[in-house]
Amino acid sequence: QVQPVESGGGSVQIGGSLRLSCARSQITGSSRLMGWFRQAPGKEREGVAAITSYSGKTYYVDSVKGRFTISQDNAKNTVYLQMNSLQPEDSAMYYCAAATNVNLWYRSATYNAWGRGTQVTVSS
Protein backbone atom coordinates (compact mmCIF):
# COMPACT_ATOMS: atom_id res chain seq x y z
CA GLN A 1 0.00 0.00 0.00
CA VAL A 2 1.52 3.30 -1.08
CA GLN A 3 -1.30 5.72 -0.53
CA PRO A 4 -3.57 6.82 2.30
CA VAL A 5 -6.97 5.14 2.63
CA GLU A 6 -10.00 7.16 3.71
CA SER A 7 -13.12 5.90 5.44
CA GLY A 8 -16.07 7.26 7.38
CA GLY A 9 -17.99 9.19 4.77
CA GLY A 10 -21.74 8.97 4.40
CA SER A 11 -25.00 10.87 4.32
CA VAL A 12 -26.14 13.06 7.19
CA GLN A 13 -28.75 15.71 7.82
CA ILE A 14 -27.96 19.40 8.27
CA GLY A 15 -26.34 19.94 11.63
CA GLY A 16 -25.13 16.36 11.88
CA SER A 17 -21.62 15.01 12.43
CA LEU A 18 -19.23 12.61 10.77
CA ARG A 19 -15.71 11.47 11.54
CA LEU A 20 -13.43 10.66 8.66
CA SER A 21 -10.41 8.44 9.13
CA CYS A 22 -7.25 8.25 7.06
CA ALA A 23 -4.96 5.25 7.39
CA ARG A 24 -1.43 6.21 6.40
CA SER A 25 0.66 3.70 4.48
CA GLN A 26 4.13 2.65 5.59
CA ILE A 27 5.66 4.89 2.96
CA THR A 28 3.58 7.93 3.72
CA GLY A 29 3.96 7.30 7.42
CA SER A 30 7.19 9.29 7.31
CA SER A 31 5.40 12.28 5.83
CA ARG A 32 5.63 15.54 7.72
CA LEU A 33 2.16 16.82 6.85
CA MET A 34 -1.22 15.17 6.44
CA GLY A 35 -4.08 17.06 4.88
CA TRP A 36 -7.76 16.73 4.11
CA PHE A 37 -9.11 18.15 0.88
CA ARG A 38 -12.58 18.18 -0.62
CA GLN A 39 -14.00 18.56 -4.08
CA ALA A 40 -17.61 19.12 -5.01
CA PRO A 41 -18.90 18.61 -8.57
CA GLY A 42 -17.89 21.50 -10.80
CA LYS A 43 -15.62 23.02 -8.16
CA GLU A 44 -11.89 23.04 -7.57
CA ARG A 45 -10.30 20.85 -4.94
CA GLU A 46 -10.11 22.77 -1.66
CA GLY A 47 -7.77 22.33 1.28
CA VAL A 48 -9.90 21.81 4.39
CA ALA A 49 -7.44 21.04 7.19
CA ALA A 50 -3.94 19.77 7.79
CA ILE A 51 -1.77 18.60 10.66
CA THR A 52 1.98 18.30 11.02
CA SER A 53 3.02 14.79 11.89
CA TYR A 54 5.60 15.61 14.58
CA SER A 55 4.33 18.73 16.37
CA GLY A 56 0.61 18.30 15.74
CA LYS A 57 0.22 21.86 14.54
CA THR A 58 -3.13 22.25 12.78
CA TYR A 59 -4.41 24.39 9.94
CA TYR A 60 -7.97 25.04 8.77
CA VAL A 61 -9.73 26.82 5.96
CA ASP A 62 -11.86 29.64 7.35
CA SER A 63 -15.17 28.04 6.37
CA VAL A 64 -14.67 25.07 8.71
CA LYS A 65 -13.00 26.73 11.71
CA GLY A 66 -14.91 25.95 14.87
CA ARG A 67 -16.77 23.06 13.23
CA PHE A 68 -14.07 20.65 12.01
CA THR A 69 -11.19 19.22 14.01
CA ILE A 70 -8.21 17.38 12.57
CA SER A 71 -6.28 15.05 14.84
CA GLN A 72 -3.92 12.12 14.66
CA ASP A 73 -3.09 8.93 16.48
CA ASN A 74 0.52 8.18 15.61
CA ALA A 75 0.39 4.79 17.33
CA LYS A 76 -2.38 3.79 14.93
CA ASN A 77 -0.85 5.69 12.01
CA THR A 78 -4.24 7.33 11.47
CA VAL A 79 -5.44 10.87 10.92
CA TYR A 80 -9.01 11.93 11.69
CA LEU A 81 -11.31 14.71 10.61
CA GLN A 82 -14.18 15.29 13.02
CA MET A 83 -16.88 17.28 11.25
CA ASN A 84 -19.69 18.87 13.27
CA SER A 85 -22.55 21.18 12.37
CA LEU A 86 -22.44 19.97 8.80
CA GLN A 87 -24.06 22.08 6.11
CA PRO A 88 -25.05 21.32 2.51
CA GLU A 89 -22.01 23.24 1.28
CA ASP A 90 -19.81 20.68 3.04
CA SER A 91 -21.05 17.99 0.65
CA ALA A 92 -18.11 16.78 -1.42
CA MET A 93 -15.67 13.99 -1.99
CA TYR A 94 -13.11 14.20 0.80
CA TYR A 95 -9.51 13.18 0.16
CA CYS A 96 -6.65 12.49 2.52
CA ALA A 97 -3.16 13.39 1.34
CA ALA A 98 0.42 13.17 2.60
CA ALA A 99 3.30 15.57 2.07
CA THR A 100 7.00 15.54 2.88
CA ASN A 101 7.13 19.27 3.53
CA VAL A 102 4.92 21.50 5.65
CA ASN A 103 4.76 24.63 3.52
CA LEU A 104 1.57 25.81 1.83
CA TRP A 105 -0.67 23.19 3.44
CA TYR A 106 -3.69 24.34 1.39
CA ARG A 107 -2.15 23.66 -2.01
CA SER A 108 -2.77 20.33 -3.73
CA ALA A 109 0.71 20.51 -5.28
CA THR A 110 2.28 20.29 -1.80
CA TYR A 111 1.12 16.68 -1.43
CA ASN A 112 2.64 13.66 -3.12
CA ALA A 113 0.33 10.85 -2.04
CA TRP A 114 -3.44 10.86 -2.26
CA GLY A 115 -6.22 8.56 -1.21
CA ARG A 116 -9.18 7.70 -3.43
CA GLY A 117 -11.64 9.72 -1.40
CA THR A 118 -14.78 9.21 0.65
CA GLN A 119 -18.11 10.86 -0.14
CA VAL A 120 -19.84 13.19 2.32
CA THR A 121 -23.41 14.25 1.59
CA VAL A 122 -25.35 16.69 3.76
CA SER A 123 -29.04 17.10 3.13
CA SER A 124 -32.14 18.51 4.79
Image: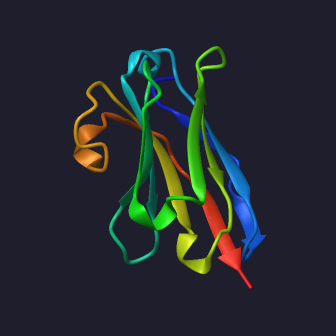
Q: Residue most toward the front?
A: 66
Question: Does residue 74 appear to the left or right of 13 in the view shown?
Answer: left
Q: Residue most toward the bottom?
A: 124
Number of on-image labels: 0
Q: Which percent across, then down, holds residue 35?
A: 43, 41
Q: Nearer the viewer, residue 1 or 100?
A: 100
Asked whether residue 35 is in view, the answer is: no
Quarter assignment of residue 74: top right
Query: According to the image, what is the colour scheme of the structure?
Result: rainbow
Q: Which percent across, then down, holds residue 42?
A: 38, 78
What residue is at 40 percent from the left and 63 percent from the top? 62
**Relative height, residue 45 to residue 37 (above, below):** below
Asked whether residue 103 is in view, the answer is: yes
Q: Which percent across, then down, holds residue 53?
A: 44, 23
**Relative height, residue 86 to residue 81 (above, below):** below
Q: Nearer the viewer, residue 51 or 27?
A: 51
Q: Could you tell me which quadrant the C terminus lies in? A: bottom right
**Relative height, residue 34 to residue 14 (above, below):** above
What residue is at 50 percent from the left and 62 percent from the top? 64
Question: Does residue 47 appear to the left or right of 120 in the view shown?
Answer: left
What residue is at 73 percent from the left and 73 percent from the top? 15
Q: Which percent across, then down, holds residue 110?
A: 25, 39
What residue is at 40 percent from the left and 58 percent from the top? 61
Question: Does residue 37 appear to the left or right of 76 in the view shown?
Answer: left
